[in-house]
Amino acid sequence: MVHYLNYIRGFMGLYIQNEIISDLKKTNSYLTINIPDKKAYDTGIYNNEVDGGAFFYGKLLGLWREFYNLAENYSVWLDNNTQYCQEKNILGFYFTLDDYTENKFLFLSRLVEVLYEYYFWTGHYSHLISDKEIDKLVQYYTYSNYNEKDLLWVKEKMQYALMRWVLTSKRFIEAKDFLSSLNEHKEFAIRSEAMRDAESKVQIETLTKESLSSISDRFNTIVHAIKTDAEEVKKLANDVGKSLEEVKALEERVSKLRTKYNFVGLSSGFSQIKDKKEEELRTSEVAYKNLFGCMFICPLAILLIHVFFPEKLPQGYNILQVFLPFITIEMVMLYFFRLSYLEAKSLRAQLLQIDLKLSLCSFIDNYVKYRKEHNTNVRKVLDSFDSVIFSPIQANENNIPSMFDGMEALANLADKIIKK
């Protein structure tokens, strides 16, 4: 509503001018200082028992505060919604200090008018300009022998004057004429659209017939092409059948290659470990076989010397000088023979585990597919595969004696023999 009023009435801009605002500030300062803030005047309808000065100045101060609050904080809003007062009674609505000092009654009447118009357009409510409060002022004006016609006009006729002012404004008439011409243009547009619709229907029917004819011709052409290509399709089907056989053969080869190269990186790592362990096993086997040969040959050599060359060996207790070192060496060789044998045994166990891991890498892919096809939980299979593949290789180290285990026992035995 407010924007529409601004359009049809124009924009005068009284209460947004810096000079007017400056004058309003001066008036406000004067009224604030010189009018006491009393509330007793608002207790009821004015009569001759109420202090007239207190009533009048109290009403004036209340109306002025409400007006000045709008002018100070909502100046554009106030200016937009008081255009009638600005246009019809421009001289009385500056609210300068001179206006107040010249005629306080007219000053208050103008405040009532401008606030009445503001609240009329905005739709807000203020009890200060209600009919009841205006009646109080009318009674006081009558009692004071001052002309109350302005206030009665505000109460009884101002709302009609505002509506008449809007309806007779130039821009409202222009808007009315625009709506009339808009209706005429609307009817013309409807008739034009109806004519275009009729023409469009004729064009649509013509295009429909042409399209159906074109589609029919195209359909016949496609059917002929399909029949012509049917024989070629049969030939291609035969060729595809032959190709399928070749594809199946290739699929079998790929499956074999997949089995062979499945987890090729993992298999390569295990193969390298296997090669190292096999080399260690060969070294360990050579070691314990050589130790076994030495352990067997040395006693045999002593026996042969004793049989065929008895004079070469010491006699009596002197023979201990030969046998004690010999027995010591034999025990040491026996100890290292045991170490080499257990190491070879451990390496064989490790190689067995590595072979198991390599075998799993070879067949796990096909096995997982088989389980999927039979709706079996593949996750458990993969968890089991991970637990085997990535488990450490057991070396049975707890069963292999340390390099110096038993040396203390040999030393104690030798010490006892020497003491004897």
Image (cartoon, grey):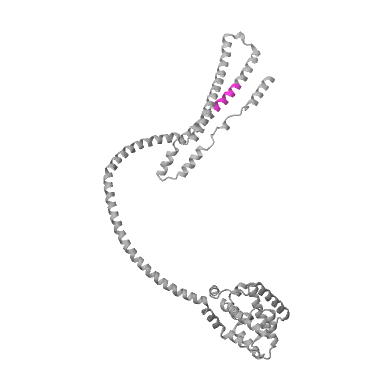
Q: Nearer the viewer, residue 162 or 321?
A: 162
Q: Quadrant of residue 78?
A: bottom right
Vertical side of 417 occupied by 211: above or below: below
Vertical side of 254 occupied by 167: above or below: below
Query: Can residue 420 be seen by looking at this rendering?
Result: no
Magenta range? 331-343
Magenta stretch contains residue 333: yes
Task: Quadrant for the C terminus, please.
Answer: top right
Q: Is residue 174 left or right of residue 404?
A: left
Question: Which residue lies at the image location 57% right of the left edge and 86% below the top edge?
Answer: 156
Question: Where residue 407 sits: x, y (%)?
Answer: 64, 25
Question: Where residue 373 sits: x, y (%)?
Answer: 40, 44
Question: Which residue lies at the image location 47% right of the left edge and 75% below the top edge?
Answer: 177
Question: Where residue 300 sits: x, y (%)?
Answer: 56, 15
Q: Nearer the viewer, residue 33 or 88?
A: 88
Query: Can residue 86 be seen by looking at this rendering?
Result: yes
Q: Nearer the viewer, residue 393 or 221?
A: 221
Vertical side of 207 occupied by 228: above or below: above
